[in-house]
Amino acid sequence: MVSLNHFLILSGVLFSIGTVGVFLRRNVITILLSIEIMLNAVNLTFVAAGRYIGTVDGQIITFFVMTVAAAEAAVGLALVISLFRHRETLSPEAFTSLKW
Amino acid sequence: MDLISFYIFGAIAVLASLGVVGQRNPMHSVMLLIVSFGALAGLYILLDAPFTAVTQIIIYAGAIMVLFLFVVMLLNAHTEDDLPKTALGPRALRIGIVLSLALGLEVAFALSRLGLTTFSNDPGTVSAISSVAKIGTQLFTTHAFAFEVTSILILVSMVGAVVIARKES
């Protein structure tokens, strides 16, 4: 029988994979993809918790997370395109002019 | 049966996500992420959330990932640059990996100490959760304000994306 623990452990593992991706990759697009993995891990937690409690609230907040993820992807990718035009690279090390 | 499906979908999701992180070609990363999202949709079906599963496929795999694919093709950046000499160096990178693995182990350990919490199989609860009508009602009554604010957010991000990505003349 599948329990809540199974889903929570799976989403913990997925979230860690996303974190590793953000740390490991040297490509802005892959970093954005890793953030999407993390968002999805959290979505899985919400839906599993909602199933456990017995309400649809988990699915509703997942719906909102998806909407915000769409907005984030649109703006993030626009930024990537704009940065690529200026620097001709996708490496995050190239975009440090605001770094003190 | 449920357990077998869970392990199959979970394994697909984890392996595909590992592939996303491990690939050097962004195009392959995006494709693998679509696979991972498909597996997650299967998990949502297991959780009696068909609406969320379909939304996952349509919005995530259908819309957001296509956006990513377009940008990857547009920028024509097939491989990642070689690891440059960062100010922090590869040691910081290694510390980051170790820390995130520690996070995963910590979460798994903490959850494994939690007692086994099984889902209720009450048919009333299951049908209430998987009902799209109920989700719609909740969305347009209790969460109506958040829903409307979301539309403003989408509008703002749309205008923002156009303004940011515009060619400066």
Image (cartoon, coloured by chain):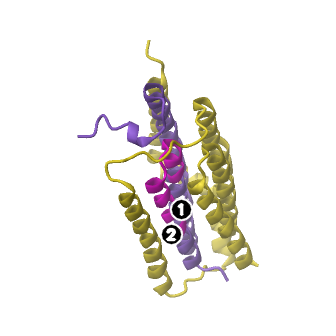
Chain colours: A purple, B yellow
Farthest left residue in view: A100
Q: Which numbered dot is residue A41?
A: 1
Q: Answer yes or no: do the residues labelled 2 and 1 have beta carbons within 8 Å?
A: yes
Tell me the quarter of the picture where residue B91 sits: bottom left
* Residue drawn where x is 58% and y is 56% of the image: B22
Locate residue B4, reporting x and y percent.
73, 77
In the rendered view, does A91 fall on the left or right side of B60? Answer: left
User: Where residue B113 appears, x then y in whole percent?
Assistant: 46, 86
- Name the residue: 54% across, 74% down: A9
Q: Give the label on residue A12, or none.
A: 2
A37, above or below B114, in the image = above
x and y percent of residue B26 in the render?
Answer: 60, 44
Q: Residue at x 65, y 57 (%)?
A: B36
B48 and A80: which is toward the camera: A80
Q: Image quadrant for the N terminus of chain A? A: bottom right
Counting from the top left corner in percent of width and height, residue B78 is at: 61, 39
**Residue A20 located within the stretch drawn in magenta:** yes
Identify the secondary structure beneath mark 2: helix
Horizontal relation, residue B88 to residue A44: left or right: left
Amino acid carrying label 2: it is: Gly
